[in-house]
Image: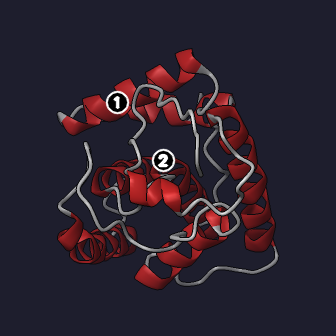
Amino acid sequence: MKSSSFEYVAGTTPLDPDEIAALIPIHITTQDQLNEWEQANIIEAENWLRARKQSKILDLNFCMKLHEKMFDQTWQWAGQFRRSNKNIGVFWEQIATQLKILFGDIKFQLEHNAYPLDELVARFHHRLVSIHPFPNGNGRHARLITDVLLINHGAKRFTWGQTNLIINAKTRQTYISALREADKGNYQPLFDFVRT
């Protein structure tokens, strides 16, 4: 990409030049074009999910495969963990370890009904976003894998504010604010948001 004008909205993790250089469609030069292209790619990933029952959701391989399916027509690094530190997330060298811990914790909590399902998967979503495993698309990936987890346990998907969180600034700010409150241990705003 020779001349891009990506604009990062609040709560978005900026890409470094090497990550931007891995953009597959060479015609994209603006954030709006990128958002539209990524959304089409994500719709294809959702179709891929509908075509098969997922049995091992809490698994590194599934986590990476889902991200790959969501962004495989957009980024050469789709499905690969980030190799640099960002403004959010664990040190990049700790990503796989932290994900294994998260998945183990959630499996245990599910087996022992530690929380009501909505609360448990909202907490899962927050922790996954906090780990921030990929260079881009972490929120969208975490929302989709959370929804897959809900569906796999017989529940309905979260509504996530009933709008596109990339475009709708007010709803996105509510979502980011809820995640920041969860960072402080106050999960109630996130619990309220996921079903609004």
The percent coordinates of residue 83 (x first, y second) are 30, 68
Of 190 and 120, the residue lying toward us:
190
The residue depicted at 60 percent of the width and 33 percent of the height is 166
On the image, which quarter does residue 106 sit in?
bottom left
Q: Which residue is mark 1?
A: 188
Which residue is nearer to you in this view: 16 or 116?
16
Rate crowding at label 2 as few (under 14), some (14 to 19) or many (20 or more) other CA atoms within 10 Å: many
Question: Residue 100, image x and y in percent?
Answer: 28, 78
| Quadrant placement of the C terminus | top right
Mark 1 is on which residue type? Answer: Gln
Query: Can you say whether 36 is above or below 113 in the image?
Result: above
How far across and how far down the image is residue 172, in percent? 52, 26
Q: Position of residue 155 (x, y in %)?
A: 63, 56
Which of the marked residues, 2 or 1, is nearer the chain's N terminus? 2
Q: Vertically, is 156 above or below 62?
A: above
Task: Name which residue lies at 68% across and 51% down.
Answer: 38
**Disc 2 and disc 1: Cα gap in Å?**
19 Å
Asked which secondary structure carries label 2, the reply is helix
Mark 2 vs mark 1, foreground winner is: 2
Q: How many marks?
A: 2
Q: Which residue is mark 2?
A: 139
Q: Is residue 67 above or below residue 96?
A: above
Identify the residue at image location x=41%, y=61%: 134
Compared across the picture, whether 107 is left or right of 65 comes to left
Up/down of 124 relative to 54, above or below: above
Residue located 65% across and 50% down the image: 157
Give the quarter of the image for residue 71: bottom right
- Residue 119 as seen in the image, left or right of residue 68: left
Q: Report the amino acid beneath label 2.
A: Gly
